[in-house]
Amino acid sequence: MLGRIFNDLDRAEDAVQEAYAQALDRWPRYGLPENPAAWIMVSARNAAIDALRRERTADAKRQLLANLEALIHADAPFDGEAMDDRLAMIFAACHPALNEETRIALTLRYAAGLTVAEISSALLVPQPTVAQRLVRAKHKIKRARIAFAIPEAADLPDRLHDVLRVVYLIFNEGYASWTHSNLVRADLCEEALRLAELLEKLLPGQTEILGLHALVLFHDARRATRVDDSGEPVLLERQDRSLWDGRKIERGASLLEGASRYRAGPYLLQAMIAREHATAATWKATNWRRILDCYDSLIDKDPSPVVQLNRAVALAYTQGDESGLAVLDALGARGALVGYAPFFAARAELLRRVGRRTEAGAAYSRAMELTHSFAERRFLQRRLAHLTSLESLTT
Amino acid sequence: MEYACLFYVPEDASPGPEVYAECMAVAEEAHRAGAMVNARGLEDASSATTVRIRDGKRLLTDGPFAETKEVLSGFFIFECASLDEAIAWASKLPQSRYGSVEVRPIRALDP
C-alpha cells in the first residue's frame, strides 16, 4: 500500500518499521488506539514524509559541506560563521568516539577536502574501504549525535589534543611513510601543513597549535633532502643544508619566538627540538645540549618509551655513546620497544660507533625485520653491508 | 518485581517488519495482562561508544562493548543533546572505573 504511494519499497518498508517502533513505544504507555491498523498506516505515512524531509535537509547539509570545501580551497579570508563551521567540522571528524583511522579519513575528506580516490591513494587503502569508513563514520556521527561544535572550554585542551594528533599522524604518514615504497609523501605533508595553518587561523593563541605548525614547518623544510635520487633515506648529518627551505624555517622560527620550554606542551617542545636541527649551520654545530634540555622537559609531559629512545640519542651526543647505550639497554630490558624498528636502528648506530660491530650487525638485522618501510629496509641493508665491509677490512 | 528482557542478536541481523509486528503483538498481550512497563529499540551496534575510566583517564572505544569476562549488570537512560553529554554522564558512573559502559543511542521516535 505505502509502496504504491511512495513508489519506493525500501522507503515504504522503513516507514512501516518506524511506525511499528513508535507503536511499541507509545501503545504500552498511552494505551491501544481504537483502530491499530489505521494508526500504523497513518504513522507510517507521517514517518515517510519526515524521512523525505530529512533527506532534503541532508542534501542541504551536503551542499553546506561542498561550500565549505570550496572555501577551504579558495584562499578566502576567514571570518564569521564559515570559520566556526569549519572548526566544528574538524572537531567532529576528530572526535575520540571514532577510531583513529576513521578520524584521519574524515579529516582528509571534510577538513582537507580530498576526494575518496585521493584519500585512497594517500593512505594506501582501497577506495571501497575508504568509502566504507566514511559511510560508517557519517552513520555514527548522525546516529550517535556527535556534535558539530567546538567543545566547551573545559573540554577543549583534551579535544584539541585529539585534533592535533590527527594532523600530526597525517604529517607523519607523509614524512615517514611506513607502508609506501616512497618514504616521503609530499601530498600528505602538504595537507598536514594546510590543516595546521587552518587550525592556527581558526583558534589563534593556542601554543600547542603553534607548536605543531612550527614542527611541521621545520620537518617539511628538509623534505627535499630526506631521500636521495634512488629514494633512499639520507641521514640528517649527510643532508645538504643549502637545499633546505629557508622560508619555512624562518616561518617556523617566528612562530616559536618567545616560547619557553618551561611552560611548553609536547608539540611546542618537539618543535623546539626540530628548530635546533633546522637552524644549525652544520651537523657539527648542532646544539645537543639544548636538544637534551628539551627532551628532559618533554619526558615530564610524555614519558613514553619512544621519547626516552630519542632522548637517549641526544644524550649520546652530549655525554658520549656509552651513556646513550646504557639508557637504551635499560629501555630494552624493560621490553617496551621489542617490536620497534627505530629502537634497533638507533642501538645499531651506537654499537657501531663504540666498535661493537657484531652486536651492531645483529641490531641492524633486527631493525630490518621489523620495519614496514621498503625504503627504510634498503637503507638499513646498506648500513649493514657497510659495517660488514669494514669488518672484512679490519680482520 | 520488574524484569528486564534484553535482546541479543547477530550483529548483521536486519529484522523485517514481521519482527516488529511480532514484538507489537507481545507488547499488546503484555499490556492487556497488565505486565507491560516499557520497551525500546537501540540504534545498531556501529553507533556505539564504549567508555572506560582507568587510572583517572577516560578511554573511549569506537564500537560496542566486547569483553566476554564482563557481564551486563544494569543500565541508565539519559536524555542528552549530544554524544559528548552522554559520555560525560557515563563517565560519572562507577562501573566505568571497574567495568565498561557502552553508550548507545536509543532509536529515535518521531511523534
Image: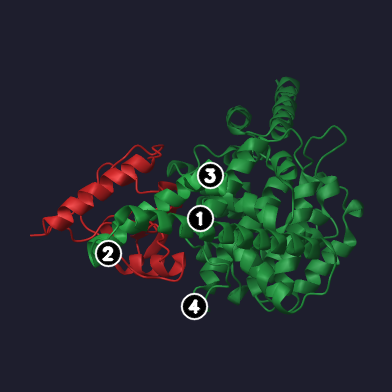
Say what secondary structure mark 4 lies in: loop
Residue at image mark 2: B76
**Disc 2: host chain:** B
Label 1 – label 3 distance at C-alpha: 13 Å
Which residue, as the protein is rendered here, is positioned at the far left? B1
Crowd class of label 1 (few under 14; some 14 to 19; many from 20; radius 10 Å): many
Mark nearer the viewer, 2 or 3 = 3
Q: Amino acid at mark 4?
A: Ala
Looking at the image, residue A260 sits to the left or right of residue B78; the answer is right
Mark sitting earlier along the chain (3/4): 3
Crowd class of label 3 (few under 14; some 14 to 19; many from 20; radius 10 Å): few
Name above or below for residue B27 compared with residue A302. above
Say what secondary structure mark 2 lies in: loop
Residue at image mark 3: A4
**Disc 4: host chain:** A
Say what secondary structure mark 3 lies in: helix
Chain that is green in the image: A
Q: Are marks 1 and 4 in contact (CB under 8 Å)?
A: no
Name above or below for residue A147 compared with residue B19. below
